[in-house]
Image: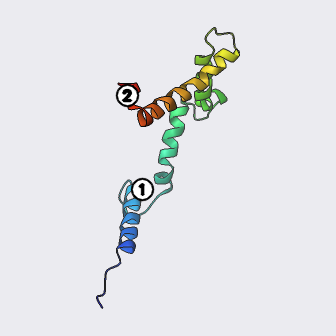
Amino acid sequence: MLALPKPPEATAKSREEKRFSRADKDKNGRIEREEILGSRRKAFAKLDTNGNGTLSFEEWAVKSIEKFGVADKDRSGWLTSAEFATTALLRRRKSAVRVNSVFNPTLLA
Ligand SMILES: [Ca+2]
Ligand SMILES: [Ca+2]
């Protein structure tokens, strides 16, 4: 019988080598703490809009605050049922387009 190579093992190894190489940003052959934390720091810095090194509730919840502000059309500080419905409409519209393009492409023509 032929001694066949074991592609799955080799693939798994080279995949892990690539993963290591990607994480080893300065290519010194070891993964330092900052090489692991770098992407987390970037994500944190993006939220820390005033750059003071801490996240206020407003900085941390910015997406939800923006969503509320957009929905509160009359700037009353609260949402009517009609205003609140607009926060769900976006999602429904997206899935409606997806359903139409999959099941009835003529609707998009
Ligand atoms: Ca390194
Ligand atoms: Ca801050």
Residue 97 - label:
none
Split into 4 quadrants, where in the image is the C terminus?
A: top left
Q: Residue at x 37, y 59 (%)?
A: 21
Residue holding disc 2:
106
Q: Position of residue 15 (x, y in %)?
A: 38, 64
> Which x, y percent locates residue 91?
55, 29
Question: Ligand 1: does it lie within 8 Å of the C-beta at label 1?
Answer: yes
Q: Residue furthest left?
A: 2
Question: Would you say residue 49 is visible in this rendering?
Answer: no
Q: Look at label 1 and name its amino acid.
A: Ala
The answer to whether residue 73 is above or below residue 102 is above
Under mark 2, the amino acid is Thr
User: Which residue is rendered at x = 40% and y = 57% of the image?
Assistant: 24
Q: Label 1, on which residue? A: 23
The relative height of residue 68 versus residue 20 in the rendered view (above or below) is: above
- Give the image location of residue 69, x and y in percent: 61, 18
Q: Earlier in the sequence, mark 2 or mark 1?
A: 1
- Nearer the observer, 51 or 14: 14
As drawn, is 1 to the left or to the right of 39? left
**Any part of residue 53 in sight:** yes
Left-right relation of 90 to 5 = right
Crowding near the residue tagged with mark 1, few <14, some 14–19, many ≥20 C-alpha atoms within 10 Å: some
